[in-house]
């Protein structure tokens, strides 16, 4: 026999399982096979998302770095160590010592990018903010910056923090 089950009855709203469930794909009604179903029922076109714990309150679009305590904190341009390494970007508001959804490399992150032209390279500014190249050039001498991606449209950043960290 087969251990295959099909769910689709309109009167069943919740299903609970005692053990692991292995699936080939879950497609939200009206969704596509290129989207990933998120825990809150929304969909994403990127698989490079994870639930991570933060050490301080973070907002959508804050750039984060992994601290030695195992939590993600807002990156800061005041120190090389707080800009270099593996970065993430918050895709939702996450409160101190809570866990939330963050994106890693090669991810389309839905965040406010209206201040930067579509197609422009985005850089990390002060306290994990995203800034344009023109604003990067205005950072104080002795601060650090790094390319973090390309503006995809008015609400989406293609997050891909590559390249060297450099001092202004």
Image (spheres, rainbow, N blue to C red):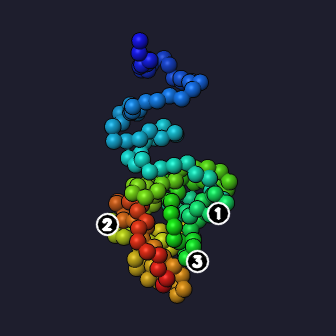
**Residue at image point 67% right, 56% down:** 96
Q: Which residue is mark 1?
A: 68
**Residue 157 drawn at (x, y percent):** 40, 60
Q: Secondary structure at mark 2?
A: loop
Q: Residues within 10 Å of mark 2 (few under 14, many from 20)?
A: few
Q: Earlier in the sequence, mark 2 or mark 3?
A: 3
Indicate which disc residue 79 carries.
Answer: 3
In the picture, measured across the screen, residue 96 lies left or right of residue 82, that is: right
**Residue 147 drawn at (x, y percent):** 42, 71
Q: Tell us which disc is closer to us: 2 or 3.
A: 3
**Residue at image point 51% right, 60% down:** 88
Indicate which disc residue 119 carries.
Answer: 2
In the picture, measured across the screen, residue 40 lies left or right of residue 36, that is: right
Q: Quadrant of residue 136?
A: bottom left
Front one among 22 and 96: 22
Where 81 falls versus 100 (above or below)? below
């Amino acid at each position: 026999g087969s251990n295959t089950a099909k769910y689709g009855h309109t009167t069943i709203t919740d299903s609970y399982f005692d053990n692991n469930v292995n699936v080939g794909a879950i497609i939200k009604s009206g969704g596509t096979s290129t989207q990933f179903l998120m825990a809150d029922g929304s969909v994403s076109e990127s698989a490079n998302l994870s639930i991570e714990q933060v050490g301080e309150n973070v907002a959508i679009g804050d750039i984060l770095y992994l601290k030695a305590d195992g939590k993600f904190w807002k990156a800061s341009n005041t120190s090389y160590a707080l800009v270099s390494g593996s970065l993430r970007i918050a895709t939702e508001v996450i409160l101190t010592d809570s866990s939330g959804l963050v994106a890693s490399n090669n991810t389309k992150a839905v965040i406010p990018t209206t201040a930067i032209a579509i197609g422009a390279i985005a850089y990390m500014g002060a306290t994990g903010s995203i800034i344009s190249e023109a604003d990067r050039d205005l950072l104080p001498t002795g601060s650090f910056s790094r390319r973090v991606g390309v503006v995809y449209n008015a609400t989406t950043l293609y997050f891909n923090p590559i390249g060297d960290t450099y001092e202004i």
